[in-house]
Amino acid sequence: QVQLVESGGGLVQAGGSLRLSCVASERTFSTSVVGWFRQGTGKEREFVAGISWFGGRIEYADAVKGRFIISRDNAKKTVYLQIGSLKPEDTAIYYCATRASSIAIISRRLEDYSYWGQGTQVTVSS
């Protein structure tokens, strides 16, 4: 059982930035695809970004491309999501999730991820 803990959320003005962190409890995290998702109030949870085991493959949702950067430090069992040029529509709870460690493909589907964190709230004021 992998436990994930997100942090780094908060209240920020439009145009600002934050760095979100996702720390895992297990070393197998270093061989897992990790995805960041978000869910705004009254909206479905959606894919934001994903990163492969060693960071060689990265994908972004079109809505965040050019503004968000995903990275990982396997030695620290941590994946980061730098979010910038924030807009009010980026307001959401941000979740990280991992796929089973044997799977190398980044997926944008929620059901393909096995473990989820509790989320961290990001609120962008206009």
Image (spheres, rainbow, N blue to C red):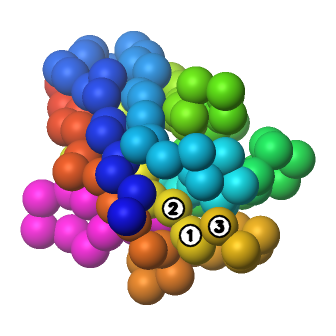
Give the image quarter of residue 124: top left
Q: Are marks 2 and 3 in contact (CB under 8 Å)?
A: yes
* Residue appearing at x 58%, y 25% in the figure: 76
Q: Amino acid at mark 2?
A: Thr
Mark 2 crowd level (few <14, some 14–19, many ≥20, 10 Å Cα):
many
100 w.r.t. 21: above or below: below
Q: On the rendered structure, is 49 left or right of 53?
A: left
Q: Nearer the viewer, residue 32 or 121?
A: 32
Q: Callout 3: 10 Å neighbours few (<14), some, many (20+)?
A: some
Q: Which mark is residue 101?
A: 3
Nearer to us of marks 3 and 1 is: 3
Res 62 seen here: no
Based on the displayed image, in which of its 4 quarters is residue 77 positioned? top right
Q: Amino acid at mark 1?
A: Arg
Label at residue 99: 1
The percent coordinates of residue 97 (x first, y second) are 44, 59
Label 3 sits on a secondary structure element that is loop
Label 2 sits on residue: 98
- Taking depth in this image into account, of 77 and 72 the one nearest to the observer is 77
In the rendered structure, which segment of residues is drawn in magenta? 37-48
Whether residue 46 appears in magenta in the rendering, the answer is: yes
